[in-house]
Amino acid sequence: MDWPFLIDILKQLLSGLPLTLELTALSLSIGFVMAMLVAAANASSLPPLRWMARAHVELFRGTPLLVQIFLIYYGLGQIAPLRHSFLWPFLREPYWCAVLALALNTSAYTAEIIRGAVQAVSAGEVEAAKACGMSGFLLRRRIVWPIALRQGLPVYGSEMILMIKATSLASIITLTEVTGIAYKLISSTYRVVEIFVVTGAIYLSLTFILSLVLSAIERRLHAHHAPQSA
């Protein structure tokens, strides 16, 4: 085992870690806001809003993320009005194309997670809250959303982990995050196995740390359900 080489490779790969974390955080944040809008539209009484929400979910869940990145990065430049709009300085950059593709993709999955979590709230608990005089925003803030958060967090945690790994696809549009740096190192050293082993270890460490954080949050949210010692 060539430890000096592995340590050197690790140091170089870690230089791409800030970009990986940045892509993950931005994509999840923007995607969550979009998902709430999509989930609200899906629950709307207006059929056109429901149709648009369902089309969004089916489109971005039903096509590969790799294809979505390619279409956004290479396809948006083919739209002449867009090239002359105020958005073009952003959309011509690989960074923002990657963020947009990742955010759109995660928004579709997250919208379904939100929908499922809200539907999992017991009708009995909602009726009990209404009997206590709660309604509208107060009912959602005190009853529906806290219960939905506890129901949906484990599934959303899996989506967060998937998004960390999905950022590796940003390397195909020239971004030098962890995987992008790995490809460059392979092209110069031809030591594929060692470099990808170290790369995999970095992603494994990230997902493991995130899993620990999510588990701690889940325990905190379910603390009141824990059996009380005598």
Image (cartoon, rainbow, N blue to C red):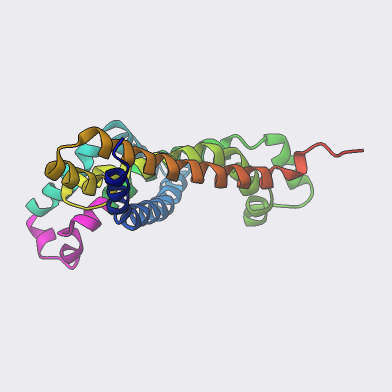
Q: Is residue 3 left or right of residue 32?
A: left
Report x, y in % for residue 52: 33, 42
Q: Is residue 13 left or right of residue 67?
A: right
For this rendering, which residue is in front, 179 or 50?
A: 179
Q: Is any part of residue 163 visible from this angle?
A: no
Q: Is residue 196 above or below residue 79?
A: above
In this figure, what is the number of numbered marks? 0
For the N terminus, the image quarter is top left
- Give, as a single range, the part of the protein colored magenta: 79-98
Report x, y in % for residue 191: 19, 37
Q: Is residue 30 left or right of residue 8?
A: right
Q: Which residue is rendered at x = 51% and y = 36% of the image?
A: 155
Q: Is residue 142 above or below residue 187?
A: below
Q: Is any part of residue 57 visible from this angle?
A: yes
For this rendering, which residue is in front, 151 or 184?
A: 184
Residue 66 shown in magenta: no
Q: Which residue is rendered at x = 27% and y = 51% of the image?
A: 177
For the C terminus, the image quarter is top right
Report x, y in % for residue 210: 50, 45
